[in-house]
Amino acid sequence: MCGIVAYIGPKDATPFLLEGLARLEYRGYDSAGVAVAGRTGGIKVRKVKGRVADLAAAVPARFKGSTGIGHTRWATHGVPSDANAHPHLDNAERIAVVHNGIIENADELRAKLAADGAVFRSETDTEVLGHLIAAHAAEGVELEEAVRAALGKVVGTYGIAVLDAEQPDRIVVARNGSPIVLGLGEKEMFVASDVSALVRYTRQVVHLEDGELATVRADGFRTFTEDARTTHRQPSTVDWEIDSYDTGGYEHFLLKEIHEQPGSVERTLGGRLDERFATAHLGGLNLDARELREIRRVKILGCGSAYYAGEMGAQLIEELARIPAHSEPASEFRYRNPVIEADTLYIAVSQSGETYDTLAAVQEVKRKGGRVLGVVNTVGSAIARECDGGIYLHAGPEISVASTKAFTSTVVAFALIALHFGRIHDLSPADGRRIVSALKALPDQIREVLAQSDAIAELAAEYAGSEGMMFIGRVRGYPVAREGAQKLKEISYVHAEAYPASELKHGPLALISPELPTVALVPDDELLDKNLTTLGEIKARSGRVLAVAHRRPEAKLADHCILVPKSEPELDPLLLNIPLQLLAYHAAVALGRDVDKPRNLAKSVTVE
Ligand code: AGP
C-alpha cells in the first residue's frame, strides 16, 4: 500500500518524482507529496490531499532540487488530508521521510518524542520517524547511522526513504516488509516501491531484502543490515517490456489486462505441459513424487480474489488428484490459532506477493513447522521469498486495482498443480491427456469470449442501473459467482451478492424482484437440469436473468445470455469467469467510475 519514489543525480528530481508517483498511483491514491533538497540548502515540500495530478498542479516551477523523495498514500493512520500526506518533517525541517507500512509502537514513540519537544503536525504513525531520525542526527553523525539507530527503536513494517537537508548528497532507504527497489542509472540513481516507476529510466535494479538499508548516492549505492554489516547485492535486469506498464492504447489498464489473458495464460503454461506423460512439470515445487504422495490435505490461503481463485484451485485438486482441498481467507486463518498438520500442504496465493495478511498466514504456518508453497505473480516478492517453493504465474505486471489476468493465471497454475498431483495419484493417462489438451485450447477460447466485449458492454449498460445484482452458480460455478460479484462491486460500486444456486430457495429468493437481476452460471455439465430449475424459480418471481452458459437456455428461463466456449468440466469455471470481468468493466464505465483506481481501495494491502 502506498508508493515511494526517490531520485538523486545531476538532473532536477521533480519531473521523475511526479511521473514515478503517477505510475505508482495504483498502490494508493488519496494524497501525495514530494520533498526536494538542492544546492541552495533546506528542504522544499509540497503535499496535497487528492491525486498525483493535483500534486503536480500544486508544485511551482521553481520547485527544484537534485535529490528528492515522493509518496502516494492510502490512508491508515489519519484521514486523507494535506497534513497527513507524506513526506513528514522534524521540527527543524531538516529530515524528510516517506513511509509505507505501519509503525506499531507509534503511540509510545510519539509520547516520548513529544515530551522531548517534538511538535507533531499530523495524525500519522510516519511522522514519528522524522522526529526520531532527527533526534539521532547529531552533529557529525552520518544519515545512515541516524536512520539505523532510529529503526532500532521501531516495531512494525516499513519501506522508507529519508532525505537530510544537511547531507543532500545521499538518500537513505530501508525495507522491512514493504518493498524498496533501487534503479541504477548513469551517474544517477532511482528508488521506488516497484519497478513500474523505474523502467523508463533503467532496467538495472536491486531489490532490498527485509532488514536491509541502503545509502544511495548519484554515483552508486551501499547496502547494509540493521546491525551495520555490509551486504553485497548484484543488480538484476527487469525483463518486462516498457509497454507492459502502459495502457497500450486501451482506455484503461483493466481493459488491457482483460485482453492480455490469452498471452498471460500461455506464459503461465509455458514449458510446463508434458504431453508424453500427460502431466505438468513444476520444478519450483521442491517436492518429489514420494513427498507428494504423503500429502493428505491441501489448504489454500489468499485474500479477496486470490482466495476465490484458491476456491477454484481447491476444486481442481480434489477433482483431479482426489486430495481433500480447501481455500480459506488468509486474513481469517492467521487469527484463529490454526491447527498445522505435517501431512497438509499449504499453498499461499498472491498476485502482488505483498499482501500482509497472506504473508502473516505463511509465517504462522512456517513457525508451526508446516510446509508452504506459493502461487505468486511478482517475482522475488516477500511472499514468494517466504515460501518453501512454488510457481510463478508470469502473468506480467498487473496495474489495475481489480485483478483479472492474475486471477485467471492463478486458476491455470492450480490446474497444473492438480494435474501434476493427479498423475502422481490416480488420474489416468487418458484423463491427463484430456486436461493437457483443454489447457492448450484455453488461449483461443479466451479470445472467443473477448470478441464479445461490445455485446457485453450493451448488456452491462442495461443492467448497471439495477439496485444490486445476484450472482449464482452450483459447485464449480459458485467460486465463479463469488469472483463475478467481487469484480462488479469493486469497480462499479453496484451491490452484488454471490450465492450457491442450490441455496437460493433457503433464503435469498425473498430478494428476487425485477430490480435485483441475477447473473446465473449455467455450464453444460451434470448439474445443468438443476440450474435450469433454479432459473425457472427466479423467473416465476419476476426476476430478470442474465445467463452465462454453454448453450442458450429457453427464452422463458433467461432474459439474456452470454455464450462461452466449452472446455473440460474441471476447467469450465475459468472461461465462465471471463465474461463477468467484461460485465464488471463495462458496468463501471457506464456508471462513470474510476475503473483502475476504485474508491477506498489500493492494489496491494500491505497493512493488517
Ligand atoms: C482483486 O480484484 C482485489 N483487488 C483484491 O481482492 C486482491 O485480490 C487481494 O487484495 C489480494 O491481493 P494479492 O493477490 O496481491 O495478494
Image (spheres, helix red, strand yellow):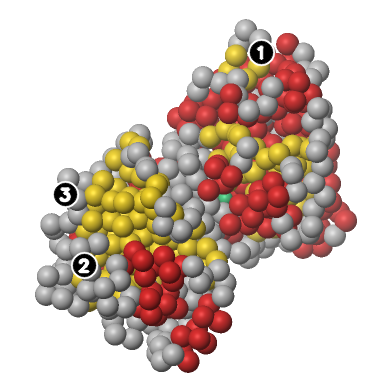
Q: Position of residue 544 (x, y in %)?
A: 69, 53
Vertical position of residue 300 compared to residue 197: above or below: above
Q: Which quadrant does the C terminus fall into? A: bottom right
Tell me the kind of residue under disc 3: Lys
Q: Which callout, 3 or 1, points at the residue further toward the start of the chain?
A: 3
Q: What residue is shown at x 75% (from left), y 26% (from top)?
A: 292
Tell me the kind of residue under disc 2: Pro
Q: Position of residue 534 (x, y in %)?
A: 81, 45
Tell me the kind of residue under disc 1: Ala
Q: Residue furthest right?
A: 506
Q: What residue is shown at x 16% (from left), y 70% (from top)?
A: 38
Q: Residue furthest top?
A: 276
Image position of 204 (left or right of 560):
left
Question: Can you see residue 476?
Answer: no
Label 1 Cα crowd, 10 Å radius (few <14 / some 14-19 / many 20+): many
Q: Which callout, 2 or 3, points at the residue further toward the start of the chain?
A: 2
Q: What residue is shown at x 74% (from left), y 42% (from top)?
A: 370
* Distance from the alpha carbon under mark 3 to that under mark 1: 52 Å
When asked about the image quadrant of residue 121, the answer is: bottom left
Badge number at residue 187 = 3
Which residue is disc 1 drawn over? 278
Indicate which label's residue lies in the foreground, 3 or 1.
Answer: 3
Q: What residue is shown at x 29% (from left), y 44% (from top)?
A: 199
Which residue is disc 2 drawn over? 168
Vertical position of residue 318 compared to residue 399: above or below: above
Question: Can you see residue 366?
Answer: yes
Image position of 469 (left or right of 344):
left
Image position of 268 (left or right of 543):
left
